[in-house]
Amino acid sequence: MSNAVSAFDFDPEKLSRYLDSRFSGQQALQLERIAGGQSNPTYFVTRGAQQMVLRKQPNGPILRGAHAVDREYRVISALHPTGVPVPRPIAFCYDASVLGTPFYLMERVEGRVFADAALSAADRSERRALWSGLADAMAAMHAVQPEQIGLEDFGRPGNYFERQIARWSRQWQESDHPPIPELDRLTDWLIAHQPQDDGRVSLAHGDFRMGNVLYHPSEPRVVAILDWELSTLGHPLADLGYCCMAWHTSPDEYGGILGLDRAALGLPSEADFVDRYMQKAPGMAPLTTFHKAFALFRFAVIWVGVADRVRAGNAAGDNAARNAGMAERLARRGIALVEAA
């Protein structure tokens, strides 16, 4: 076995034995940990000519309902036949004795990843089209009817925002993170400004943003939507509002574009991006301040969980400790958004 990196959070020999039994016969195995993830440890796995990606839960204690790799595997298995761009599922292993936690394998898709919303690694002339491709992929995902692909029980339909605010508020309250008054204020504002439920239900990704998709190697279209652990049945405007966080966070706040000269960089405005999505999702209700504030609230609580794992020594991302104050900054962005409305 040849390892591309020196440290893993499991025994590579155990993975090798599992794959040999799963696929029959022995093959040389190469592993490479993928940097950048803040949640579920992710690895490139090359076994002979077969190229796969492994996703697993982090070691150590985790919050109830977090790191749901089983849900990730279920949703990509359901979506793959529909044409929505997701990797082909390969295998799921519930047996924690193999790698220490449950894990799954999916096909490795070749493509481009852009870590920042400014698309600094892309040509200026392509950036607007790349953002359009992101809107198109999101609309295609939302167009799939969950009951038609066996996901009618993937979450509770209706009252999505009410339930989500309750869920993430509870996670915030159960955390041992130091107080964040802005996050408490943002929670109160969201509770007071919830829109009436319009009955629309779709598959909600939960973490739909530029850094969680793969683009075609040479075309501005998404070839794989990744990181489905937060997916559920929900409201499509939750994903759209979440994706719009890029226009309300700065480059050092997880790669936002607030404060940049978008025209000079060839980037679309928030309105242009939303309009592109709406063109592909006819009949959708308008995106409001509530949806964008909800996204900032929810992402802030996610970063509370990251900070908790840093203190516990279980954070998956190499830069998690450097971003320990992200929850406070996102909460402040949320307050600024609602105050400007």
Image (tube, helix red, strand yellow):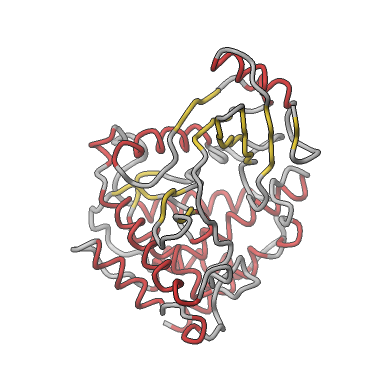
The x and y percentages for residue 315 are: 71, 47
**Residue 328 at x, y = what percent?**
65, 67
Count of residue discs:
0
Q: Residue furthest left?
A: 283
The residue positioned 40% from the left and 37% from the top of the image is 75
Q: Nearer the viewer, residue 125 or 160?
A: 125
Q: Is residue 141 above or below residue 294?
A: above
Q: Position of residue 300 (x, y in %)?
A: 58, 61
The C terminus lies in quadrant? bottom left
On screen, residue 132 versus residue 25, left or right, reads: left
Q: Specify whether 338 is left or right of 274.
A: right
* Residue depicted at 64% across the width and 21% down the height: 27
Q: Residue at x 44, y 40 (%)?
A: 87
Estimate the x, y position of residue 334 in percent, counting from the top left.
Answer: 52, 72
Left or right of 96 on screen, residue 141: left
State the residue in front, 195 or 266: 266
> Which residue is at 52% across, 63% downward?
297
Instruction: Tell me which corner region of the image, top left, top right, bottom left or bottom right, holds residue 67.
Output: top right
245 lies above or below 13: below
**For the N terminus, which image quadrant?**
top right
